[in-house]
Image (cartoon, rainbow, N blue to C red):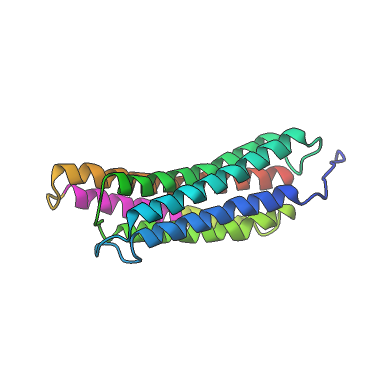
Amino acid sequence: MPLRLRPNDPTFYDLFTESANHLVDGARILAELLGSTAGTGLSSSHQIAAAMKDAEHAADETTHSIIRRVNSTFVTPFDREDIYRLASDLDDVMDYMEEAVDSVHLFSLDKLPEEIAEQIEVLQRAAQLTAETMPRLRTMKDLAEYWIEINRLENTGDAVHRRLIAKLFSGEYDALTVMKVKTVVDLLEAAIDAFEHVANTVEQIAVKES
């Protein structure tokens, strides 16, 4: 077996953990947007959209820090391509969540279907799991349970998404509202799918490093 150099520098692991913690913040802001209970009116979308924009900027800065670090480091803890991919996957989750919040604000939506709360619960759980998992990249131990659970959550998200789409096209809403709400619903679904991409990348890294 060839000798592999693995640096002791914890910076990459710390940055990935920081990136995942931004997602925890983003999912929390999403819940605040709904006032914790969808279907009963939204909290101030202007203030929450601004808070989400700040969270997205902070996540971007962490992503840029990861890219700068990998570009200036001779020996990385695992493949450079995987580092780039994981950083990008984490960034995608935040981007979709920010777009969803911004869409609620721009469309002046003051009420959303209550099932959207289920999408946000999935996102909050996935974000918390991801934040707990990133530090374990350093040892590459006990990672399988992460991608298994994220896959389960993604399946749950798919089921919720299908129910939401069926409800939107049930005739309960006018055509313009359907278009607006569907944009938000689809962006939240995209964020859930992006978490599965994160989990897939973690699995690929674990397999290579095992």
22 or 115, which is in the foreground? 22
**Residue at x 26% of width, y 45% of height:** 107
Residue 15: give x, y in percent of width and height. 67, 49
What span is in magenta? 153-169
Image coordinates for residue 55, horizontal then vertical, percent: 51, 51
Between 154 and 35, the residue placed more toward the observer is 35
Q: Please identify the quadrant where the N terminus is shown.
A: top right
Which residue does the image show at 46% across and 57% down from the upper left?
A: 27
Seen in the picture, residue 67 relative to 193 is either above or below; the reply is above
> Is residue 31 depicted above or below 196 in this figure?
below
| Residue 168 on the magenta span | yes
Residue 149 shows in the view: no
Specify the principal SS of the magenta part: helix
Q: Residue at x 54, y 43 (%)?
A: 91
Q: Is residue 28 above or below residue 178?
A: below
Q: Residue at x 39, y 55 (%)?
A: 48
Query: Quick check: 97 left or right of 198?
Result: left
Position of residue 183 in the picture relative to residue 54 (left or right): left
Left or right relative to 8: residue 21: left
Residue 151 visible within the image: yes
Q: Does the stretch in magenta take in 57?
A: no
Residue 12, horizontal then vertical, whole percent: 71, 47
